Image (cartoon, rainbow, N blue to C red):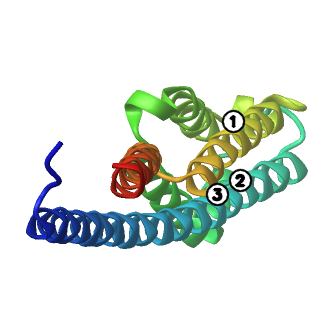
Amino acid sequence: MESLPSTVYVAIGAFLAAAITAAASLVSLIASKEMKISELRQCWIESLRNEISEYIGIANRMSLTWMFLFPNAENHDEGIARFLSDNLSEIERLDTLMHKVLLKLNPKEHQELIDAIKTVEKNIANPNFLRSNGGIAAQLDHVHDLSQAVLKKEWDRVKDGEGAFVKMKEIVSNIALISMMLLIVIVLGMVFF
């Protein structure tokens, strides 16, 4: 049986080296992109956590202030006007935070949290609801619990890697395994044949 010319082995080696270099470049490109996405997602998580906690804090503070100033259901038009005037910056901040949070949430993934925040928004403007013992507090607790679930899910996504990164790791692992097997077959073929 004739042996292959040595130039064939050189060509195979050059092809394998080029394939490995291309694969390494692709892996590097995808990994750097995914690392940047993870960094941005971490910033998004931290920002969302801060904004939701501030939102809950302001809403809770306003509710407690309201209940302290107006423990009865009697109409206190002058007191209500003073309350609104004294807390205008808090009301504006609450509205700003709500919109920031809603714009950061994906309706396809976070609809339950979006609905809970909108429910708080609707009820925070209702004096009778604010006055009720535990009404707004229960809703804020619900927003808190849903927020923790969203933040945990997103943190797990950062920890595990984006979908493309996970698939890329699997593909590269398979390519590396196949390349190693091919290299072993070539080396064994050169030794035994």
The residue closer to the viewer here, 99 or 128, is: 99
Q: Residues within 10 Å of mark 1 (few under 14, many from 20)?
A: some
Residue 123: tell me if it is visible.
Answer: yes
Query: In the rendered image of this protein, does residue 163 appear above or below residue 48?
Result: above
Q: Is residue 50 left or right of residue 189?
A: right
- Mark 2: amino acid: Ile
- Mark 1: amino acid: Leu
Q: Residue at coordinates 40% horizontally, 64% vertically from top-left?
A: 37
Q: Residue at coordinates 60% horizontally, 31% vertically from top-left?
A: 116
Residue 165: tell me if it is visible.
Answer: no
Mark 3 → mark 1, Cα distance in angstroms? 14 Å
Image spot of residue 176 (x, y percent):
42, 53
Mark 1 → mark 2, Cα distance in angstroms? 12 Å
Of callouts 3 and 1, the N-terminal one: 3
Q: Residues within 10 Å of mark 2 (few under 14, many from 20)?
A: many
Q: Residues within 10 Å of mark 3 (few under 14, many from 20)?
A: many
- Image quadrant for the N terminus? top left
Closer to viewer: mark 1 or mark 2: 1
Q: Is residue 34 left or right of residue 138?
A: left
Quarter of the image for residue 14 reads bottom left
Q: Evaluate if marks 2 and 3 touch, with contact meaning CB atoms under 8 Å apart.
A: yes
Residue highlighted by disc 3: 55
Q: Look at the numbered disc 2 and give the secondary structure of its residue.
A: helix
- Mark 3: amino acid: Tyr
Q: Look at the numbered disc 1 and give the secondary structure of its residue.
A: helix
Residue highlighted by disc 1: 146
Image spot of residue 7 (x, y percent):
9, 70
Residue highlighted by disc 2: 56
Q: Evaluate if marks 1 and 2 touch, with contact meaning CB atoms under 8 Å apart.
A: no
Q: Is residue 104 left or right of residue 135?
A: left
